[in-house]
Image (cartoon, rainbow, N blue to C red):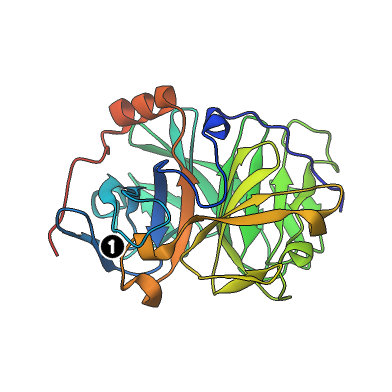
Amino acid sequence: MKQAFCTLSLAAASVGFAGVASAVPVYVSFTTDISLNESTSPVAIVEEDVLLFESNSPGSNTDGDVSVFIDGITTFDASGEDIDAFDVFGGSSYLSTTGAASIGGTGFGSNEVVSLTGGTASVELSIGGSGNLDALSVTSDGFYFSFTTDQASLTINGEVEGGVLEEDVVFYDPSLPAGNRISLAFDGSAIFDGSTEDIDGFDVIGDNLFLISALTGFDIDGTGFSDGDIVQIAYDPSDPTQSVASLFLSEDEFDAGFADDDLDALALIPEPASLAILAAGLGLAATRRRSA
C-alpha cells in the first residue's frame, strides 16, 4: 500500500502543541455510560453523547469543564447507541457507531460514515471489511480511518485495498483516480512497541501531526500511555520509526476514577468560524448539564 503524506494546514495547528498539551478543547466520546467530575458538579454521560472537554490545568490531574455537544438521547432514534468515531469539519459533524443506528429516519450501519448538518443525517461513505470502523478524521482532502481488527480486504465506496492492520490509519481521497484512492497514512506497526494495538480515536491536527487514543494501554519508544490518554504524534512519513510521541491530554484530567473506562472517539475543536456554524445549525451546542 502506498504511503500518504499529510500536508493539511489547519488553524488548530498554530496553537503551539509541545509535550503535554495546552488547554485546547477537544470533543470526546466514551465506550460506556459514565459520570465525570466536572469542575463545578458531576455530569452524567451516556455512550451516545459527544462531549466538549476543556482542561483547567493541562498536565495535571485536575478535572476540567465538561459540556454536552451532541445529546445522543435526543439525536438518535433509539437509545443505547455508541458513537465510536467522530469528527467536525466544514459545518458538519461526522460519526460512526458500533452497531446499526438511525437519526431522523435515516438508517446506517456500523461501517458507514454519517454526516449530521442542521439535524439532518446523510450517509457519506460505506465501508466493507471484517472489522468495525472505530476512528475517523475528516479533512479538505479526504477521510482517515482505523478499524477494530486487521483487514484482509478493505472496500471504501467500491475501492478495494488489502493488508490494513488495526494499528494502522488509512487515508481515502475520493478525488483521485480509481485504484489510487486508498493509502497508508499512519503505520502503527512502526510506531507502537507492541504489535497488536488498536487505535480507537484519531484526528489530524496539522502537517503530519496527529492525535491518537487506543483501546488498551500502549507503549511508544518505551513510554507508557493509558487507554484513555490522548497522545500527540509528530509523524515522519519517510521513516515512521523516527516519529515522536508526547502526552496531549491525560485520562486523569477527565476524572480521577476514569481508568476503568475508555475513550473511543476524539476530535480537536475546529477553528472558531466552523464552531459558530455548528452551534447555530445543529442546535446541539453545549448548554445542557445532567446531574449524576
In the figure, is residue 238 to the left or right of 51?
Answer: right
Query: Looking at the rendering, in which quadrant would you find the C terminus?
Result: bottom left
User: Looking at this rendering, what residue extends furthest in the top direction?
Assistant: 273
The image position of residue 243, as x and y in percent, is: 75, 54
Placement of 11 over or under 40, stated as above or below: above
Placement of 185 over or under 12, stated as above or below: below
In front of the other: 250 or 150: 250
The 10 Å Cα crowd at callout 1, few under 14, some 14 to 19, many 20 or more, is: many
In which image quadrant can residue 200 be found? bottom right
Query: Image point 42% across, 46% down: which residue?
Result: 26
Q: Is residue 278 visible?
A: yes
**SS type, badge 1:** loop
Residue indicated by mark 1: 46
The image position of residue 195, as x and y in percent, is: 74, 75
The image position of residue 95, as x and y in percent, is: 47, 48
Query: Image point 65% across, 43% down: which residue?
Result: 209
In front of the other: 65 or 283: 65
In front of the other: 75 or 85: 85
Query: Image point 61% across, 68% down: which residue?
Result: 148
Q: Is residue 85 visible?
A: no
Query: Image point 70% across, 54% down: which residue?
Result: 244
- Check disc 1 and give the amino acid type: Val
Mark count: 1
In which image quadrant can residue 172 be found? top right
